């Protein structure tokens, strides 16, 4: 199956008809001890053994309609419209709560891929304002592997209009997810420690202006006996 390289522009694979059910549904097929939200885990250390989406991406099955180094695109099992696609990063991340500012470039690329694929499939013009990009918040995500729903707003079913309605506590928009990470990035960059101003102490030594331990505990700094002897002589 053809893949898009970084040096060349995105290349859309030949569009496929709506796929049937993916034949990976239980722990035995995924290779784990138990399955939760499409992810197989080990009983011993709770490690991820396999994932439904990771399986689709790795096997590059007929469900995949676009593929590049870090991202794959395929259709959902229960689409909300004919234009509904899933944009999935190949690296396994459980849900949007596990995203960090280091994933901002990945999210931007996911948006670019969604715009390209939907425009090539004829559902919208590139950079169409009517493009709907959404992530489900846990525990309302169906698969524990980060994925972005992309579709055209005006062509959703009644159920899809509710299920993929952004600005709710079960569904977040692409803009919301990106802005939240940008806020975290700014908070991290502004959390530098500022040195306290310093002043000369009673004995001429440099000390912090907030250094008041002798006041707090009711004690005083030790006397400088050499200074006191010179004062007695005078």
Image (spheres, rainbow, N blue to C red):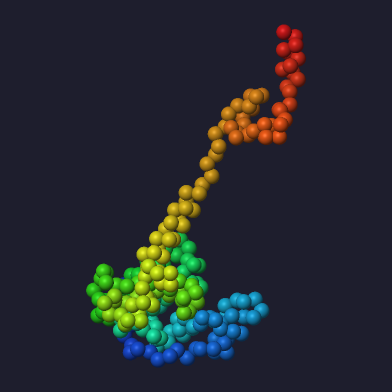
160 or 174: which is nearer to us?
A: 160
Residue 214 seen in the figure? yes
Residue 1 x, y percent position in the rendering: 39, 85
Q: Is residue 195 above or below residue 86?
A: above
15 or 68: which is nearer to us?
A: 15
Residue 187 x, y percent position in the rendering: 47, 53
Residue placed at 73% from the left, 23% from the top?
223
Q: Is residue 130 above or below residue 38?
A: above
Q: Quadrant of the C terminus?
A: top right
Residue 34 x, y percent position in the rendering: 59, 84
Residue placed at 61% from the left, 85% from the top?
33
Residue 4 seen in the figure? no
171 or 182: which is nearer to us?
A: 171
Residue 56 x, y percent position in the rendering: 45, 84
Residue placed at 51% from the left, 81% from the top?
37
Horizontal side of 192 relative to 228 (left or right) equals left
Q: Residue furthest top?
A: 234
Residue placed at 43% from the left, 61% from the top?
180
Res 182 → quadrant: bottom left
130 or 169: which is nearer to us?
A: 169
């Amino acid at each position: 199956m053809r893949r898009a390289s970084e040096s060349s522009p995105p290349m859309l694979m030949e569009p496929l008809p709506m796929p049937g059910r993916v034949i990976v549904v239980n722990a035995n097929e995924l290779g784990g001890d138990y399955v939760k939200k499409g992810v197989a885990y080990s009983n011993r250390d709770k490690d991820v053994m396999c994932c439904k989406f990771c399986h689709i991406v790795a096997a590059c099955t007929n469900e995949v309609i676009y593929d590049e180094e870090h991202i794959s695109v395929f259709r959902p099992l229960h689409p909300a419209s004919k234009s509904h696609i899933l944009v999935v990063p190949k690296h396994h991340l459980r849900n949007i709560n596990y995203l960090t500012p280091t994933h901002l470039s990945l999210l931007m690329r996911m948006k670019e891929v969604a715009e390209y694929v939907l425009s090539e499939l004829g559902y919208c013009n590139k950079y169409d304002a009517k493009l709907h990009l959404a992530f489900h918040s846990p525990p309302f995500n169906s698969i524990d592997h980060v994925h972005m729903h992309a579709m055209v707003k005006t062509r959703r079913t009644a159920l899809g209009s509710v299920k993929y309605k952004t600005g709710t506590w079960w569904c977040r928009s692409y803009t919301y997810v990106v802005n939240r990470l940008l806020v975290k990035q700014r908070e991290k960059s502004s959390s530098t420690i500022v040195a306290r101003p310093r002043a000369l102490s009673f004995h001429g030594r440099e000390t912090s202006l907030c250094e008041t331990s002798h006041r707090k505990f009711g004690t005083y700094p030790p006397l400088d006996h050499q200074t006191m002897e010179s004062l007695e002589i005078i």
